[in-house]
Structures are given as structure tokens and as C-alpha cells.
Image (cartoon, rainbow, N blue to C red):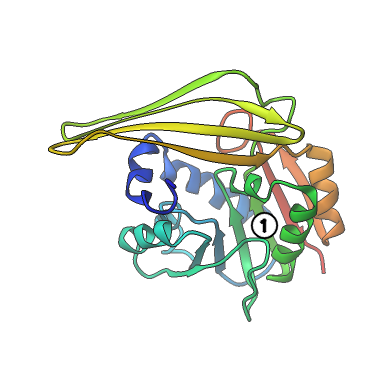
Amino acid sequence: MLYKELGKYYDLIYSWKDYKKEAIHIKKLISKYKKSKGNELLDVACGTGHHLKFFKDNFSCTGIDINMGMLKVAKKNVNNVVFKQANMISFNFNKKFDVILCLFSSIGYVKTYSNLRRTIKNFARHLKKGGIVIIEPWFGKPEFKAGMPWMTTYDSKNIKIARLNVSKVKNNISILDMHYLIAEKNKDVKHFVDRHELGLFDVNKFLKVMKEAGFQAKFLKNGLMKDRGIYIGIKSD
């Protein structure tokens, strides 16, 4: 629900996130590992577009997301970027890119290893030889703490938001039932529950999937957020 009808609240919930700092880190990885000569960049699951703000001056950027609500916000946030609605598992463009990004643990939403294989193969199909894919994962099963309570808040004069959940695990899927309370000036308080289900992928299995898709792949523990790391893949053919 947050990603669709209530996309306007997304940027408030994540106002703590330092997109500029993360983009600087990613640019360093691109400079170090990318072998192709072009500057075509695809941001998969781009959300409201804030990472793209810091890439559009150096790259020709395209952003895709499955949810139109998020893309509507992204188009207001960022200009000079092409935005398209598409599913990361099955998108099919008649072009190849030099850089594909999939950040903020969005890859977890494919849930299963079968979908992960399809997604990574799809990334490979859309990359030039020597192009780079950078994937920020969700947690693995050992790192994900079931039963823990979590809270995120946003506080301004005219709007207050509280988001709470208790983490759950079923097989290899993490389940997050996010309970939101939103209080806006001159409006009734809203309450809704937004379920998120993300796959808990093992690092070695993830790397194997990348290598099978034709990537020289590695996992770096020093990622953008604590305990998540980052995957780097260079297309070898």
C-alpha cells in the first residue's frame, strides 16, 4: 500500500537516508570495476528516484519500478531521467546498459531462488560486455532477527508518522507487517497495515546464481547499510 496509494509518505519515512553519500560510494565502485566504455545507467526498483538525482549528471539514466505510485513521485523529484513501469524479473528493453543498479534491498522482493535466477539473467541480458551490476541485498537468514520489534518515526509540525513491526520468518521468507499511524494537520489519523515479504538469500548461493548468468561476481561486506553488504558483477561475455 505504501508503494502505491500512499507513495507520497515514502520519502518522509526514509528522510534519514543519505542518498548522496550512497551515490558517491556507488560511483567509486563503478569507476573501479566497470569495463565498458558507455554511460547508460538503469536503476531497477528506483522508488522515488532519489539515487538518480546524483547519477543523472554523469550518466544517461533510466529508472524502472513496478509501482506507478512510486514513479509518479519520482517524476516530480527528478528531471532528465526516463521512468518506466516494469517488473525486475521480466522487463524487456531493446537496449543494453553499462550500469545496472538494484539498491535498498529491493532484490529481496523476488522472494525465491527461481525468481532470483530469472532476474539476474535478465540483468545480464540488458548489460553490455564489461558492464557492471551493483545489487544491495536484503539480509541473509543468519543476520535476520525474527521476533524483534522495530520502530521508525517521522516528526514535523504538520505531519507525524509512526511505523512499527515485529519481524517474522517463514521458511526462507522474511515477513514484515508494517503498522502505520499517520497524523496530518486537519485530518483524521490514518492507520493501515502494509505487508512486505522478502527472500532471505544465502551469499554463496547468490554468487553462484550471478556466475551462472555470466558475471564475474563478488560480495563486499562494506556496503551502503549496516550488515547488508553489496554484490558486484561484471559481465564477462
Nearer the observer, 101 or 36: 101
How many numbered dots are placed on residues in this image?
1
Residue sitting at 58 percent across and 18 percent down? 148
The residue at 79%/56% (across/down) is 117
| Amino acid on which disc 1 is placed | Val
Q: Is residue 34 visible?
A: no
206 over 182 or under it: above or below: below
**Within 10 angstroms of label 1, few (less than 14), some, or many (20 or more) residues?**
many
Residue 41: x and y, percent? Answer: 55, 65
SS for callout 1: strand
Left or right: 9, with 59 as reference point? left
Residue 21 picture location, percent across and down? 45, 41
Question: Where's the C terminus, which quadrant?
Answer: bottom right
- Residue at the location (60% across, 72% down)? 38
Q: Measured from the top left, where is residue 227 in percent x and y?
A: 63, 28
24 to the left or right of 208: left
**Quarter where residue 236 is shown:** bottom right
Residue pointed to by mark 1: 133
Q: Is residue 230 left or right of residue 190?
A: right
Q: Residue furthest bottom?
A: 94
Q: Is residue 217 visible?
A: yes
Q: Is residue 234 above or below residue 166?
A: below
Most distant residue in the left direction: 186
At 56% from the left edge and 66% from the top edge, which residue is drawn?
A: 86
Image spot of residue 222 (x, y percent) = 64, 34
